[in-house]
Amino acid sequence: MSTETNWAADAAAVLENDRVRLAPVTEADREPVRAVAMDPDIWRYFVAAVTDEASFEEFFDTCLADQAAGRRVVYVITDKESGRVAGSMSYGNMAEADRRLEIGWSWLGRDFRGKGVNRWAKYLLLEHAFDRLLAERVEFKTDVLNVQARRGLANIGAVEEGTLRSFNYMPGGRRRDAVFYSVLRAEWPRVQRELSAWPKVSGKAPEA
């Protein structure tokens, strides 16, 4: 079977189920994203900090630029129950020759945490990565201090692999220790079965 794809093009698709819709970012998303992004708690462990209008503009312009250049596929997440933008996730570090990519740059607005939005968004991204892009490995990384994100990754079936110490600078100058997780193609059928069994009704999915 041929495994030839164009990841930059094929990844940039609309992904949805009954609970969430993920679509590649466009200029039209600027104000809906701004409406949920101006919460400093979102950015506590993020590699960029949105602290005011100027930093939001820089953050959003970077999303558009990365998307246009094929460095990332930046998805805007819409919660179907409310019809509101809930946050964003991305594909990045797309090593097509090695069939490897990262799901990251993930954040959700305050109203959408712990309601299954994170889980269903990551499910759609994993499904697209393995079934459409034919990835062999999907990886995640997060701050060793971000207990909530680490719990969420464990809950979607990702395997903790280890910690890379002093991995990168964070806003404010702290050096982050980054914890890596992954799901491999051989593990995907099991993970998919478990994720597919979760209810799509808001508030009834396991905590994420």
Image (tube, rainbow, N blue to C red):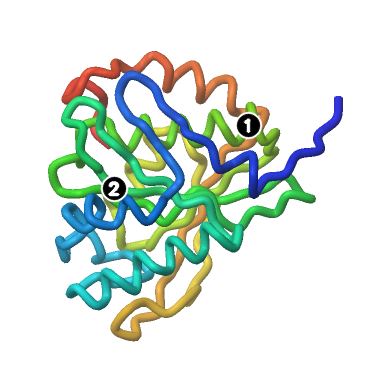
Residue 178 is left or right of residue 1, and the answer is left
> Which residue is denoted by mark 2 in the rendering?
87
Residue sitting at 35 percent across and 64 percent down? 60
- Tell me how far mark 1 sits from mark 2, CA to CA: 23 Å
The quarter holding residue 21 reads top left
The quarter holding residue 86 reads top left
In the image, residue 155 lies at what x, y percent? 37, 34
Residue sitting at 54 percent across and 56 percent down? 72
Dot 2: element: strand
Dot 1: element: helix
Residue sitting at 38 percent across and 62 percent down? 143
Residue sitting at 29 percent across and 16 percent down? 199
What is the crowding at mark 2: few (fewer than 14 residues within 10 Å), some, or many (at least 20)? Answer: many
Name the quarter where the C terminus is drawn.
top left
Sequence-wise first label, 1 or 2: 2
> Which residue is denoted by mark 1 in the rendering?
130
Q: Is residue 70 above or below residue 8?
A: below
Amino acid beneath label 1: Phe
The quarter holding residue 27 reads bottom left
